Amino acid sequence: MNEIGIDVKFLEGKAVDYEQAIRLCADCLLQTGYIKDSFVDACLEREQQFPTGLPLNPGVAIPHADSVHVKKSCLCLLRLTEPVQFRRIDNPEQKIDITFVICIAIAIPNNHNVVLAHLIKAFQDNTFTLELESSSPEEVVALFKARMLTN
Amino acid sequence: MKRIIVACGSGVATSTMVAELLKNALAKRNIQVEIKIADFKSLSSLASTAHLLVSIAPYEKFNYGIPVVNGIPLLTGVGAEGTVDEVVKILSAK
């Protein structure tokens, strides 16, 4: 999906906990050659130390790991069919329900600052995310692309 | 030019997002600043060069002698303008 400025993988799935959710994303990125084997453990460790649950509605988590574990930049957007709890980014003692996991793999050097800012702004818009939540998987891809291509 | 550091746990993703959003918000107010991104590990060497630190982990305490602003509202969008107001206020004070 290079027209939006970064590659994106889409997944729809179920996870019993945040760890399984992150592993679903990492497996996808690993199999498609974007990340190294070391990424998933680094990502899980980082999530434990500095959680990434954003208290939006629906909830969005942005797990990621240091660029040393990344071969090529890519986002993996996972829509969970049932929410999974992640700890809050601003209050690690609190858990919140997350529907969208955006696993972010960013290589260095990169010029993704604009697309990343655009991405988070899109997910702050709950008209957009509620629509993403209730659409079919194919519609999710189309809606996401359309949003990322608009200014 | 004033310099802001945006820092998070590790990896550049969140600080990149917040730095870009902050840069855009300040530009809208006609304020030019230099914004560097860093992880917490590299902060001690960089902090002396900055006027302000925007932290993506507000529960981590820093004592570098510069003001610290919570950057999370820029990530959630909730209270983002208030955070930008706070940054502007601090930048104009020095």
Image: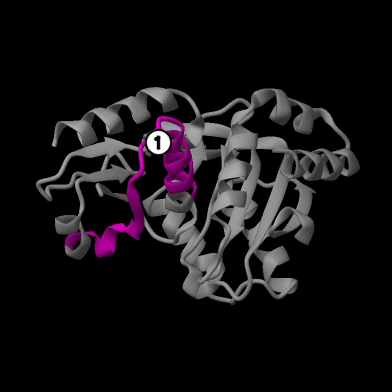
The one nearer the camera, A84 or B49, is: B49
Specify the quadrant of the image occupied by residue B70.
top left
The one nearer the camera, A89 or A72, is: A72
Secondary structure found at label 1? helix
What is the residue that sits farthest to the front in this orientation? B30
Assess disc 1: are there few (<14), some (14-19) or many (≥20) residues with their C-alpha within 10 Å of its C-alpha.
Answer: some
Which kind of residue does numbered mark 1 sit on?
Leu
Location of residue A88 in the rendering, given as x and y in whole percent from the top left corner: 44, 36
Q: Can the viewer see residue B7? A: no
Q: Residue at x 48, y 37 (%)?
A: B75
Which SS does the magenta portion mostly show?
helix
Q: Quadrant of the C terminus of chain A?
A: top right
Q: Which residue is mark 1?
A: B26
Q: Which residues are magenta?
A: B17-44
The one nearer the camera, B32 or B23, is: B32
Chain hosting mark 1: B
